[in-house]
Amino acid sequence: MRTLRFFLLALLTACSCDDDRIPGDAPTRDMGSAFDLSGTDMMTVPRDFGMYDPFDPDAGCGAATIPTERVPGSLILVFDRSGSMDEPASGDSGPTKWGLATTAINNALAGVSDELSMGLMLFPGSDGDACSVASDALLVDVAPLSTTRGIISSTLAGTSPSGRETPIGSALRAGWAELDELDGRGQKGLILVTDGAETCETSQAERNAVLALATTENDASGYLTYAVGLNERNNFLSTLAFNGETPRNDTCMPECTAATCYGASECEGGQACNNTSVLGIPVPGTCQCTMDSHCPAGLSCNMFPIVGSTCEGPSNCCHYDAEGGSFESDFQTALEDIASRFLDSCVFEVPRDGVDMFDPNLVNVGVTFEGEERTVLRQSSDSSMDSWNYTTPENDALIIQGPICDRLLMGSAEVEIVVGCPTIII
């Protein structure tokens, strides 16, 4: 089990800070003495004047320790119920993908904390255009699992796969729009689960626009977008997870398989595309390699006279995948891992108890990894940087962001929040 310790150090008195060790440039305990602010009223120091150590025990600030906690997040399960989900997961017979997947969902949710909020969206919907996600798509509103666990289970039990199309782009936009409507301070995200590729927005430009939107939703709102392929590995799902800031590991490649194509014009170097259509519905294929250089790193091109060529080898994709005989266990493991990562988010409560005259401009955050000096983070609106920022207009929760969040989730660390001294900003 990963363990994290969190403390809020509430500085209950103003920082008189009569020590010349306060300013400096390094975000550690040893801050140097680039400036002499002795005798300065710290309440009037500009927030961007430079780096100093608000955690310095010699700074003359009275301190008390108050525990802080992670803020539970909210997830929407965006689940494919197109007709192909009624096909056997392995070969020509046996349990269907729908049956195995719904069992895996129930098993996974049984072990997830009641604190996680989750809702269920199914696509395609039962009304509206086949290539849109209708108003009835969100069948279970987002609420703590203590309330929705049973509702999700019964909803899936009373539903069966239907629909010819797989409108992934529309489903994602509908999911992100639902996240916009949620209240709450915690991390927000969605899990796309599908056994196929997009059949509606099939042009390269349309697919790229959806992938770019995953980046925009993360940058603008902090939404995380997970992707799970059921017997499906393709570059769209892999890039979606990468752009949605949910790569399965640190070494995965957004383009991890042969390029998906809906026509030869989408393939480079004169490669053919083995796409087809069924009853007028486009079924994407892959660009047919003729040499190893047409394949992602780690894969090689194998030529087959009848079925065409393919890139083969272990694919290091960024999305989760469930396949063949281990379909159910793979999917359950993926859901459990996603839930665990999501519950162990980098969003923390900013308690007010015992803090007089709270000022959001007098808050600082530090992270100390085992065996290392404390890193004092600056506040920033840029989520790609090692920094922190408030998640709500009320400033009652904050998120630690950038690569340091990934480190925080993977190892033991101490997170400290101090209030009372001017916030260091970027």
Image (cartoon, helix red, strand yellow):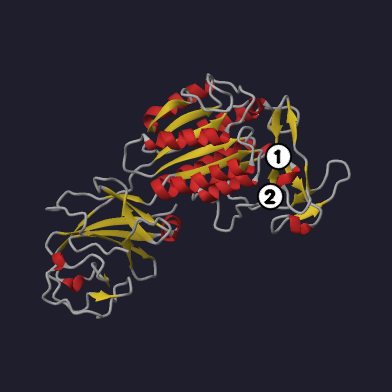
Asked if marks 2 and 1 touch (Cβ < 8 Å), the reply is no
Task: Determine the secondary structure under disc 1.
Answer: loop
Which residue appears at 84% of the width and 50% of the height? 303
Residue 199 lies, in percent from the top left, at 64, 33
**Residue ID for mark 2:** 257
Task: Classify 213 as above or below 46.
Answer: above
Front residue of 192/158: it is 192
Residue 214 lies, in percent from the top left, at 50, 45
Considering every residue shown, the one lying at the far right of the view is: 305
Task: Determine the secondary structure under disc 2.
Answer: loop
Which residue appears at 23% of the width and 67% of the height? 54
**Residue ID for mark 1:** 262
Q: Quadrant of residue 209?
A: top right
Q: Say which mark, if any, is on residue 176.
A: none
Front residue of 400/274: it is 274
* Mark sitting earlier along the chain (2/1): 2
Q: Residues within 10 Å of mark 1 (few under 14, many from 20)?
A: many
Residue 424 lies, in percent from the top left, at 27, 64
Q: Quadrant of residue 283?
A: top right
Q: Which callout, 2 or 1, points to the residue nearer the camera?
A: 1
Which residue appears at 66% of the width and 28% of the height? 84
- Is residue 109 at all visible to an observer of this figure? no
Q: Is residue 183 left or right of residue 277?
A: left
Q: Give the amino acid type for the residue marked by disc 1 in the picture.
A: Tyr
Q: Is residue 212 left or right of residue 265?
A: left
Task: Classify 202 as above or below 247.
Answer: above
- Is residue 173 at all visible to an observer of this figure? yes
Front residue of 270/39: it is 270
Residue 141 lies, in percent from the top left, at 40, 28
Compute the Cα span from label 2 to label 1.
Answer: 15 Å
